[in-house]
Image: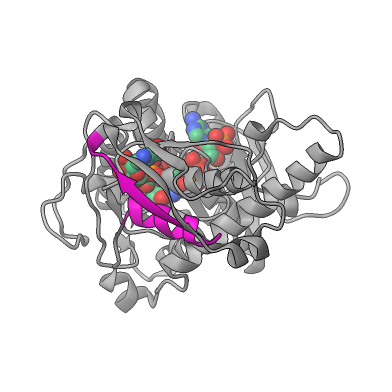
Amino acid sequence: MSKTALIIGITGQDGSYLAQHLLKKNYIVHGIKRRTSLFNTSRIDKFYKDRHEQSTRLLLHYGDLTDSTNLIRIIKETEPDEIYNLAAMSHVHVSFEMPEYTGQTDALGTLRVLEAVRILGLTKKTRIYQASTSELFGKIQQSPQNEKTPFYPRSPYAAAKLYAYWVTVNYREAYNMFSCNGILFNHESPLRGETFVTRKISRAVAKIVLGLQDVLYLGNLNAKRDWGHAEDYVESMHLILQHTIPDDFVIATGISHSVRDFLRLAFLEVGITLEFYGEGIREAGRIANINIDLLEQKVPNFSRELQVGKRVISVLDEYFRPTEVDELLGDASKARKVLGWKPRYSFEDIVSEMVLSDLALFQKAKLLQDSGHEVLFESIV
Ligand code: NAP
Ligand code: F7E
């Protein structure tokens, strides 16, 4: 008998990887996607088949975390064995501009999912995974951070996720529900949203070497994150719900790098060495050296405007946050011991995969442009 999973937020980075992982495990996967005026399914299109055309184990439903009646109906109709609540307004900086909506979705949205399962009498059948986050640790109280580290949220996003974390624990204790938190540290991939710093960098490297972008504008280059790969991390979500008892787990690599490290490595992937000059919001980065052989091998049609001394990075005030999370470093030893989970991708693998993927994307677009087509490079994802 196949198990049935419901992924809320299936159109996001993690939703896409998790759906593929569960389909490989023979699950029937239902996904909730939002109604949008343009298609928002680019991350799942490659494995989605229209159910009217051929039999499929992946089924999509329109829905939204802000709509309880919709959630209750979909959960009633699908009666899932497992719900993965991955939906969220997930951008920390944007949450300062949309704090109320962030609370509605990320905090109360989680409550709506838990309540729907309880109201429908599915507490014994349905296991729930809540996408909690290392942002809960915020202004860190100890390092590395594990399941016992006190929380100190530093953004409306983190404060909303704090509510979601505790209400997930509360429903477990109050109603005996199998509701669990995965406290995941940053995880990236070629499918990462374009405004998160890693993808912003990998896209910019590709565009700069192809002559499609001049300068990359960034905020705090000194922030440190424990970056892993989304493909590794979605496996932990599944393992958390297969465990014999409901529990909460930190998922991390145990290695931390700065935004500056990510930048340096991303440019090095195409043979460019960076050097930084200036301080604070006057800091910038320029090309210190070009390994022409490597550049030519990776990007045969590289821009001839690339020269030693060219400024390619500028720090801008507007990309700094009102309150910052300076550094995060996770200790996932509980997940390793109890679930047998460990990451496969290294930091170097992630940077390389993201840069090469964006290079391939923009190479294709540039070829189209060179053959006379109008191409809107900003909208390429
Ligand atoms: P993502 O790419 O931003 O995806 C978020 C998903 O939520 C998208 O499918 C989005 O739909 C959907 N969504 C947003 N608002 C919604 C609403 N009101 N109702 C229903 N769906 C809504 O995020 P991700 O990187 O995959 O992360 C998945 C989850 O893990 C999020 O909850 C995030 O906060 C959390 N998390 C992420 C990380 C990380 O490093 N990636 C680390 C820890 C925790 P659209 O496609 O229509 O926008
Ligand atoms: O920022 C700095 C920024 O937006 C990382 C989400 O998935 O992971 C993510 O949140 C760091 C921060 O991710 C720019 O100040 C510098 O210190 O890529 P980010 P995040 O804020 O860590 C957690 C675990 C989640 O749960 C979230 O959902 O990079 N930074 N310059 C910049 N960040 C951005 N976005 N843009 C810049 O130009």
Was residue 276 drawn as part of the magenta stretch in this picture?
yes
Q: Do we see residue 45 in this rendering?
A: yes
Q: Position of residue 305 (x, y in %)?
A: 60, 43
Q: Name the residue: 58% across, 37% down.
A: 213
Above or below, 349 relative to 8: below
Q: Which stretch did the figure color magenta?
A: 258-280
Task: Identify the residue shown where x is 60% and y is 31%.
Answer: 34
- Residue 36: x %, y % from top left: 64, 26
Residue 155 is situated, as x and y percent measured from the top left of the image, at: 26, 33
The one of 336 and 166 positioned closer to us in this rendering? 336
Residue at (54% x, 64% y) in the render: 291
Q: Quadrant of the N terminus?
A: bottom right
Q: Give residue 372's quadrant in the image.
A: top right
Between residue 324 and residue 239, name the one nearer to us.
Answer: 324
Q: Quadrant of the C terminus?
A: top right
Q: Nearer the viewer, residue 290 or 221?
A: 290
| Quadrant of picture, ligand 2 | top left
Q: Horizontally, is 110 left or right of 172 in the view?
A: right
Q: Is residue 277 left or right of residue 371?
A: left
Q: Can residue 85 be seen from the camera position used here?
A: no
Q: Position of residue 366 (x, y in %)?
A: 74, 42
